[in-house]
Amino acid sequence: MSDSETIIRVALLSDTHGELDARVADVVAACDYAVHAGDVGSAAVLRALKPRQRLVIAVRGNNDTQETWPAADRLILKTLPYEGTLDLPGGHVSVIHGHQAGEPAERHAVLRERFPQARLVVYGHSHRRVIDQSETPWVINPGAAGKVRTYGGPSVVILEASINGWRVEERQFDAPGAAPADG
């Protein structure tokens, strides 16, 4: 496969609040990189993210505080930035938690204005999965990848990036303890 045909798979996730769903971890393991858009909750979540290339970009969310993280993890918490970037074939991904981007109705416009050079902006905070490809940069909230406010079950978005184009795929799993849907 030539460089122009190389496809990079990136797991986009957010809002684990200290507990990463095992099914999301399995998706991450099948990707090259992982991007976590904040409210990580513990170093254990970061250690559980094992993409093939071992690169995890994670940012601090509004609930990533000294008071909410385990005492033993607080040095790691201090290393989390509030914004991050991942360069990929065909552009780059910017990541921020999203609580800094105003009210929900204006959030995508604010993020597009703040990161005009990005091809994709990933954010979290609302726990609600949204894929907005109406203009560039795309704006994606992958939803919650843990157990808190998953709105139907934990989710993750997979970005496939190549020099020839980008595409995204949504994955949502049943909430733990929920009966699988018939059919």
Image: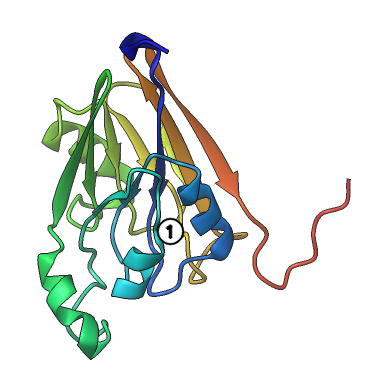
Instruction: Tell me if residue 133 can be seen.
Output: no
Q: Is 112 placed above or below 179 here?
A: above
- Residue at 47 percent across and 60 percent down: it is 145
Position of 170 compared to 46: left or right?
right
Which x, y percent locates residue 121?
Answer: 27, 37
State the quadrant of the N terminus. Answer: top left
Residue extending farthest to the right is 183
State the quadrant of the C terminus. Answer: top right
- Residue at 11 percent across and 71 percent down: it is 78
Question: What is the number of callouts on the image?
Answer: 1
Q: Is 86 placed above or below 167 here?
A: below
**Residue nearer the viewer, 3 or 173:** 3
Q: Is 167 placed above or below 9 here?
A: above
Which x, y percent locates residue 91?
Answer: 23, 22
- Residue at 23 percent across and 72 percent down: it is 64
Position of 24 compared to 2: left or right?
right
Which x, y percent locates residue 73?
Answer: 22, 80
Q: Secondary structure at mark 1?
A: loop
For mark 1, what is the residue? 127
- Residue at 14 percent across and 25 percent down: it is 117
- The answer to which quarter of the image holds residue 79 is bottom left
Please state which amino acid type lies under the numbered disc 1: His
Which x, y percent locates residue 101?
Answer: 20, 50
Instruction: Tell me if residue 19 can be seen.
Output: yes
